[in-house]
Image (tube, rainbow, N blue to C red):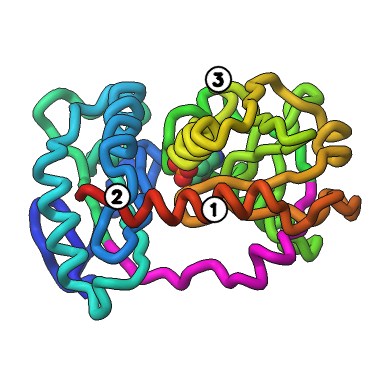
Amino acid sequence: MQVYLNGRLIPEEQAVVSIDDRGFLFGDGVYEVVHVYGRSLFEWDLHMARLQRSLAAIKLPTADQDELLRVARLLIDDLASPDGEASLYLEITRGAHPRAHGFPPPGTTSPTILMWVRPVAPIAQETVQQGVPMITVADDRWAKVWIKTVGLLPNVLAKEKAHAAGAFDAVFVRDGVVTEATSANVFIVQNRVLRTAPSSNYILSGITRQVVLELAEARKLAVDLTPFSVEEMVAADEVFLTGTLTEVLPIRSIDGHQVKEPSGPVARQLLNDLHDRASWGKH
Ligand SMILES: Cc1ncc(COP(=O)(O)O)c(C=O)c1O
C-alpha cells in the first residue's frame, strides 16, 4: 500500500518518521479522519475547514488543500477495492527538531505531513440494531479539546477502561454534564427532541454532529443544544453516538442501565439519511 509522507507517495514499509519528530515527542500535531464512501470523500470541505482551525490553534501554517485533495484521490485510486468504504487519515506535526519544548527557530524545520487511506468494514447491521454498551468516566482532559490534536492519551485511557469493563466506549462527564465520547459526540432523544452538548472548548465539534443536526432539521426534528446530565441521558428515549467512522450508532446501556429504545429508531433514521447524503458526494 502506498502512503503519502512529506511530498512523496511511497510504499507503507518505507514511510518512517524521525525520532526527533515533535508529533512523536510532544504530541505536537493535529489530524483529521475522513470517511471515504466509494471513492467519494464525505464532507471534505468541512474536514479541511476544521483542519485549518486546528493548525491555526497550534500556530502551524495553513495546509495546501488542493494538494491534499490531489493526494487523497491518488491514494483512493491506489486501493485494491476503491469502490468500498475506506478511512483517510491525515496528520500534520510541527516537524523534526532536536528535543526542546519551545518551537524550533523559524526556517529550521518544516511540518511532517502524513496521509494514508485504508479500507474499513461497514459497521455491522447487528451492532446498529442492538446498540452498544457504554460506561461513564470523568472528563479530566485539558480545556482545549476543540483542537483536533494527536495528543489523545486521556481518550486512549478512557477507551481502554471501557473495554476492560466489557463496554464499547466511554462517555466523558465534566462538572456533572456529558461532554462527548472518546472519539464521537453523544446525542440523546427525548420525545423526539434531539439534544447534544453545545459547541464549546470542551468538545470536539464533530463533522458528523454537524451533519446530523442538519439532517434532523430536514426531518423537522427539534434540536436542543443545552448540556445534559448523566441522569437525563440514562432516562432518555434514545442515546446515540456520532462520528466519522462511527456514523450514527445507538447506545443500548450506560453503566449497566438499559436505554429505553436500545436500537434507536430516530438514530437509525438519521443513519439512513447520512448514508443517502454520502452517496451525493461531490469530491
Ligand atoms: C473526541 C472526539 N469527539 C468527537 C468526534 C467526532 O468527530 P467527527 O464527527 O468529525 O468524526 C471525534 C472524532 O474523532 C473525536 O475524536
Residue 43 lies, in percent from the top left, at 32, 43
Q: Earlier in the sequence, mark 3 or mark 2?
A: 2
Residue 271 badge: 1
Give the SS element for disc 3: loop
Residue depicted at x 19% and y 55%: 72
- The amino acid beneath tag 1 is Leu
Q: Nearer the viewer, residue 154 or 86?
A: 86
Q: Is mark 3 within 8 Å of ligand 1?
A: no
Residue 74 badge: none
Q: CA distance from mark 1 to mark 2?
A: 25 Å
**In the image, is residue 133 part of the stretch drawn in magenta?**
yes
Residue depicted at x 9% and y 28%: 107
Q: Earlier in the sequence, mark 1 or mark 2?
A: 2
- The amino acid beneath tag 2 is Leu
Mark 3 = which residue?
Answer: 200
Give the SS element for disc 2: strand
Task: Find the magenta span and give its range.
Answer: 117-135
Horizontal side of 172 relative to 27 (left or right) equals right
Which class describes the residues within 10 Å of circle 1: few (<14), some (14-19), or many (20+)? many
Mark 2 = which residue?
Answer: 90
- The amino acid beneath tag 3 is Ser
Q: Quadrant of residue 234?
A: top right
Residue 140 lies, in percent from the top left, at 68, 32
Residue depicted at x 59% and y 51%: 269
Q: CA distance from mark 3 to mark 1?
A: 25 Å
